[in-house]
Amino acid sequence: MSIKQFNATYLAADDRILFRFNTAEDTEFRFWLTRRATLFILAATQHLMMKDLEQTHSPQVAKAIAEFCKEAMQIDPSNQGALQADTYQPASNYPLGADPLLVMDVKCTPEKQGLEDGVSLDLVLPGGANINVKMAGSTLQTMSILLNQLREHAAWGEVPSVSEVAIQAEDKNKSGNKPLVH
């Protein structure tokens, strides 16, 4: 499955993001992302991108490169089509159905995508179903920028560090709630 476009909309009444993407194979997937799931995706992807850069650079240089890339993606007009909702072209096939599914949990692991480093994102759905989405660098950055813009619009606060997310998940696990990080 090759991702072609992303589209996301913040719905204030539900305090959720309607996140959808279509593929080169004319399929579309639709999900509801909660604040918790969105912040985890952003924290995990930022962490994994930094770890990848730190393999060849010092932590300070890696941080500077990551900031530069983030700013370049937001300014570069060639990337704006991927971020504008009005250019999104819905697909004609919906393998999981036309109604969005609530993402109950998220798992994120680093993974090679050919020669490029990427991420394997597991979205856990109601009833324990799971969909795995694999993204390489530029696709991952585009998704992160889009979700981050919506996070800012929703006033969901800053993206926590991965260690903060792990502590929150551990606390939720102790209180009987299902953890976000496994």
Image (cartoon, rainbow, N blue to C red):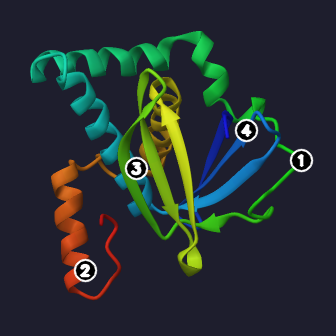
**Residue type indicated by callout 3:** Ile
Q: Is residue 96 visible?
A: yes
Judging from the image, what secondary structure is the residue with disc 4 in?
strand
Circle 2 residue: 173
**Residue type indicated by callout 2:** Asn
Task: Tell me the CA gap for discs 2 and 3.
Answer: 19 Å
**Residue type indicated by callout 4:** Thr
Task: Tell me the CA gap for discs 2 and 1.
Answer: 40 Å
Circle 1 residue: 92
Q: Nearer the viewer, residue 154 or 67?
A: 67
- Tell me where residue 64 appears, x and y as whole percent: 21, 16
Which dot, 2 or 4, sits closer to the camera? Answer: 4
Q: Is residue 68 above or below residue 126?
A: above
Circle 3 residue: 41
Task: Mark 4 and mark 1 in contact? Answer it, CB < 8 Å.
Answer: no
Please report whichever mark, 1 or 3, sits nearer to the chain's N-terminal start: 3
Task: Tell me the CA gap for discs 2 and 4.
Answer: 35 Å
Please report whichever mark, 4 or 1, sits nearer to the chain's N-terminal start: 4
Q: Is residue 156 visible?
A: no
Write the residue at 46% across / 50% down: 121
Task: Tell me the CA gap for discs 4 and 1.
Answer: 11 Å
Q: Nearer the viewer, residue 73 or 28?
A: 28
Q: Quick one: which residue is furthest to the right in this view?
A: 92
Circle 4 residue: 23
